Image (tube, helix red, strand yellow):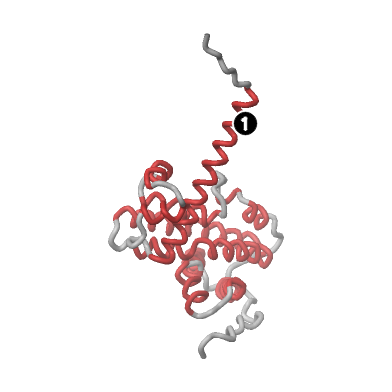
Amino acid sequence: MAVVKHTSPTTRVYQSTRRAEQARRTRARILAAATEQFVARGYAATTMRSIAEAARVSVPAVELIFGTKPKLLKAAIDVAIAGDDEPVPMFERGWAAAAAEADDAAAFLATFARALREAAIRSAGLIVVADEAARTDRDIAALSRRLSQQRVMTVTWIVDGLRERTALRAEVTRKMAIDMLWLLMEPLVFQRLTRERGWTPAQFERWFTESVSRLLLPGADKVSEMPRRPKSGTP
């Protein structure tokens, strides 16, 4: 007579939890491999096979989780910007809550600048890759437009947050403030300064904060000196 093997509810929960954790680790490994290859090799030269090999999984496994290469790049960028893959809206994250609690414009701006610095370290390279690939790839062009629109939403939130705490300079309209901040947050600016000009992320953060203050806020003409030139930089 056949022996029936019973599985307890506790065992099933354990097995389900273990499988979910394994899937999470596999997804993270694929995203890490994709991020490294996209930034190092560019979008066109990076293949699903090369990503799968780097992540030590099969190509079908990558396609099962992410679908296509454009969708994989999108997922990598989303995780890089947020810092994790939790389904938490951007303006409900810790940095936004901390900024919202700031009493004055300086504290509000400083809180955002720290968050921007960390997000740029993780995501700027990927976003630059997407912008470059957008010239020839329709799917990536749509992704690049979405990222730009997201930056506009973030910038608008920041500008309005500043305006709630202080007036802008008399000659600066809300739209001008949004446009200037949008440009300062351009990922290519971060990449150029940190990769080509030798700035540290901390120097970028300070430059960003001082630039926003000088351009947008009244009475901010006299602020601390700009970041010192890195010792290894060229004159």
Residue 58 visible, this angle: yes
Above/below status of 189 relative to 21:
below
**Horizontally, is 171 left or right of 72 in the view?**
right
**Horizontally, is 193 left or right of 73 in the view?**
right
Q: Quadrant of residue 47?
A: bottom left
Between residues 179 and 72, which one lies in front from this camera angle?
Answer: 72
How many dots with numbers? Answer: 1
Which amino acid type is shown beneath numbered disc 1? Answer: Tyr
Q: Position of residue 40 (x, y in %)?
A: 43, 66
Q: Position of residue 189 (x, y in %)?
A: 47, 72
> Few, some or many C-alpha atoms within 10 Å of disc 1 (few <14, some 14-19, many ≥20)?
few
Q: Residue at x 39, y 61 (%)?
A: 130
Helix, strand, or loop for circle 1? helix
- Name the residue tied to disc 1: 14
Q: Quadrant of residue 60?
A: top left
Q: Residue at x 62, y 54 (%)?
A: 96
Q: Residue furthest front?
A: 1
Q: Position of residue 111 (x, y in %)?
A: 65, 62
**Horizontally, is 111 left or right of 38 in the view?**
right
Q: Residue at x 55, y 14 (%)?
A: 3
Q: Quadrant of residue 224?
A: bottom right
